């Protein structure tokens, strides 16, 4: 799926207000990563400092810090759960998030509380695209902005 030149795989679930994608794993855990839209908003990422594996992460609380040009932001979880794993490759190569946000640039894996009860809160497919488009509208996202165009995920 494509929106304003940004890709959004239809097999993933999305948390548009967090600019994150979610992938259900076979063991019941959920992998999180920054969407192409999140990458466009942040620009080049220089560091990702995750919380410690084993910590309980509350919904809307940080699971790590993303550092980008002259600023940093908390990567907030859309889920409550235990932090099972972090992408250690990002310590040495945080640019993986920009280069392959839906693959090698994944950020964290959580064991969410009561995933079956909340999974449908995270849209996928065309429903996700509508929700992401609304988030872009609320953010006053301007795809014609030349600075944004340079950040589009490829």
Image: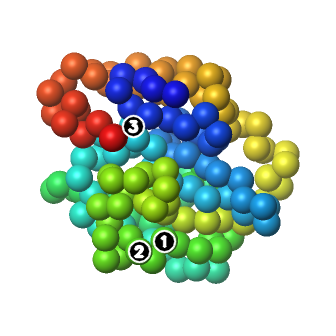
Q: CA distance from mark 3 to mark 2?
A: 22 Å
Q: CA distance from mark 1 to mark 3?
A: 20 Å
Compare marks 3 and 2 and give the one earlier in the sequence: 3
Residue at which label 3 appears: 37
Compare marks 1 and 3 and give the one earlier in the sequence: 3
Residue at image location 38% in from the left, 70% down from the top: 90
Q: CA distance from mark 1 to mark 2?
A: 5 Å
Label 1 Cα crowd, 10 Å radius (few <14 / some 14-19 / many 20+): some
106 relative position to 41: left or right = right
Residue at image location 85% in from the left, 45% down from the top: 117
19 relative position to 29: left or right = left
- Residue 145 lies, in percent from the top left, at 18, 24
Residue contact between numbered discs 1 and 2, judged by CB atoms under 8 Å: yes
- Residue 149 lies, in percent from the top left, at 22, 30
Residue at which label 2 appears: 89
Label 2 Cα crowd, 10 Å radius (few <14 / some 14-19 / many 20+): some
Q: Is residue 57 visible?
A: no
For the residue pair 22 and 56, the one nearer the viewer reads as: 22
Residue at image location 27% in from the left, 57% down from the top: 45
Label 3 Cα crowd, 10 Å radius (few <14 / some 14-19 / many 20+): many
Residue at which label 1 appears: 87
- Residue 132 lies, in percent from the top left, at 50, 28
């Amino acid at each position: 799926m494509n929106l304003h030149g940004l890709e959004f795989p239809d097999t993933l679930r999305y948390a548009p207000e967090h600019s994150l994608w979610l992938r259900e794993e076979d063991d019941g855990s959920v992998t999180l990563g920054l969407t192409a839209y999140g990458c466009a908003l942040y620009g080049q990422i220089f560091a990702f400092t995750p919380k410690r594996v084993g910590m309980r992460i509350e919904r809307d609380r940080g699971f790590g810090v993303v550092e980008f040009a002259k600023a940093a932001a908390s990567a907030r979880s859309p889920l409550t759960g235990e932090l099972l794993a972090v992408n250690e490759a990002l310590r040495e190569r945080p640019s993986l998030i920009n280069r392959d946000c839906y693959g090698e640039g994944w950020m964290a894996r959580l064991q969410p509380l009561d995933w079956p009860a909340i999974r449908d809160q995270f849209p996928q497919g065309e429903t996700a695209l509508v929700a992401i488009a609304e988030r872009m509208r609320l953010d006053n996202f301007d795809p014609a902005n030349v600075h944004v165009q340079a950040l589009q995920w490829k």
